[in-house]
Amino acid sequence: MNGGADTILAAEDRAGLEAAHLRLLAGARHRVSIYLPLLEPGVLDSDPVHAELRRIATSGRQAQIRIVTHDAERGHREGHRLLALAQRLPTAIGVRVPTEEAHLRYGSAFTTDHAGGFLFRPVAGRFEARGALDEPGETSRLTAYFDEVWERAEPAWQIRPLGI
């Protein structure tokens, strides 16, 4: 890692995961990628995290939040705040669903901030996570995988607001 202990992110439970996401997002400027196979309640939907995502999405012309999820329809049906934000800011927030079986079997979750920070959960359905605010190598590796899935995924049409 490039930084010291103050740049390390770790979580063992829901509160720790929220705090780690908040630290990562607070340092992000304009671009974030989120790979979240399951849009589970309590993950990336608290008020402070939502405020940071809104800040990033409205940060200017370079603003871009990309989200890959395996089941956008379920997340939409259950009212996940991340998808509601994507509906309100569709030019800055994109949501796609993988179509290839290999991508649909991917069971980890991660967030990257494109400035060298990442938070990685080896098992998407669990809260344990590790990451760093300044580790461009691992961030690049995760972002490269995200980009591969993003390019082959389909837009999540099921979350489009009516009338658009």
Image (cartoon, rainbow, N blue to C red):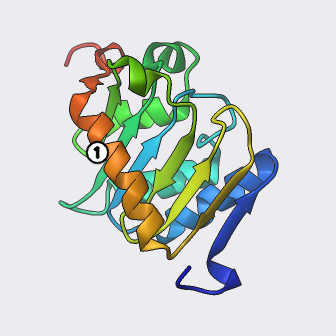
Q: From the viewer's perspective, is residue 77 above or below residue 138? A: above
The residue drawn where x is 48% and y is 18% is: 71
Give x and y (percent) for residue 47: 62, 48
The residue drawn where x is 32% and y is 21% is: 156
Location of mark 1 (residue): 147
Name the kind of residue labelled 1 in the image: Asp
Q: Quadrant of the C terminus?
A: top left
Q: Nearer the viewer, residue 161 or 41?
A: 41
Lateral position of residue 111 relative to residue 128, left or right = left
Q: Quadrant of the N terminus?
A: bottom right
Q: From the viewer's perspective, is residue 130 above or below residue 28? A: above
Residue at the farthest front position: 102
Q: From the viewer's perspective, is residue 72 above or below residue 109? A: above
Give x and y (percent) for residue 136: 42, 72
Q: Nearer the viewer, residue 78 or 146?
A: 146
Give x and y (percent) for residue 120: 58, 52
Circle 1 — which element?
helix
Give x and y (percent) for residue 154: 25, 22
Lateral position of residue 87 relative to residue 18, left or right = left
The residue drawn where x is 79% and y is 51% is: 15
Query: How many residues crowd around disc 1 within 10 Å: few (fewer than 14), some, or many (20 or more)?
Result: some
